[in-house]
Amino acid sequence: MPSVHDQLFRTLADPTRRAIFERLCREGEQTVAALTARAGVSQPAVSKHLGVLKQAGLVRDRHEGRQTHYHAQLGALAPLIDWTSQMAGFWERKFDQLENLLRRMDQ
Amino acid sequence: MSETRSVVVEREMPFPAEKLWRALTQPHLIAEWLMENDFVPAVDHRFRLRGSWGSVDCKVLEIEPQKTLAYSWDAMGLESTVTWTLTPTGAGTHLRMEQSGFRRDQAQAFAGAMIGWQKFFAKLEEVLEGSVP
């Protein structure tokens, strides 16, 4: 589904927007104010980025009083990444490095 | 809800178990293939693996020299156990790594943070360069 991929890629192509998404992935739900405090851009700009992320299905919002909380929807990345095979790939690379080390220890 | 997953990687290594054991348990050797660390081969010892992307909190759970090494592996919401098993073969050692006990959503968060991004950005560049239809 190239069009779904394209939208995800284009949405995350902007470094500021990507940084906001990564922070939500790593740190969990946050308010717009909390995100703005560390985003390096104005609150309206952060809100605009969040709107684009929401449209791509990458974040969801939750209203509580006057605050809006955002959280990442990692499931939206599922079409792109098979997580278990990513982890296996990490260990395969580590096995390669281990084997290289063992060969050097031989000398 | 409580369904857990595991990742298994196995390989025949043309080296004796004794040598593999050293690479798995000596801090300066671990640093060469896995990550910077303060590992000590003692049950209940807590140590930390440090990568460029963040760190992993670990605790030694089980040690049987040249046979089994297990430690907890907690990072970015991923709570798991890594177990190494060494089995001598005619030509060397069969090495098995099992990372187990994590839930699917934990794997997503962890892999996304640690592993996924590099490939993800490589793909991203391809799209931006118009090489993907």
Image (spheres, helix red, strand yellow):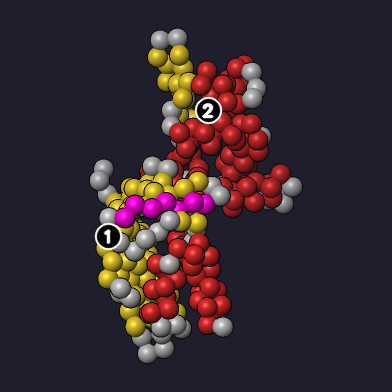
Q: Tell me if residue A97 comes above or below residue B103 in the rendering.
A: below
Q: Position of residue A81 (x, y in %)?
A: 50, 50
The quarter of the displayed image where residue A62 is located: top left
Q: Position of residue A72 (x, y in %)?
A: 47, 33
Work out how far the residue at label 2 is from the one at label 1, CA to CA, in angstroms: 46 Å
What residue did someone put label 2 on? A54
Magenta residues, start to end: B45-51
The residue sitting at 58% across, 39% down in the picture is A8
Inspect the image, locate mark 1, and give the three-letter code of the amino acid beneath it.
Answer: Val
Q: Dot 2 lies on which element?
A: helix
Local packing at callout 2 (Cα closer than 10 Å; few below 14, some 14-19, many 20+) is some
Q: Tell me if residue A59 comes above or below residue B105 in the rendering.
A: above
Q: Note whether residue B100 is visible.
A: no
What residue did someone put label 1 on? B43
Left or right: residue B23 versus residue B123 is: left
Q: What is the chain letter for disc 1?
A: B
The quarter of the picture where the C terminus of chain A appears is bottom right
Residue B80 forms part of the magenta stretch: no
Q: Tell me if residue B98 comes above or below residue B116 in the rendering.
A: below
Q: Tell me if residue B30 comes above or below residue A43 in the rendering.
A: below
The residue sitting at 49% across, 67% down in the picture is B29
Q: Position of residue B39 (x, y in %)?
A: 40, 59
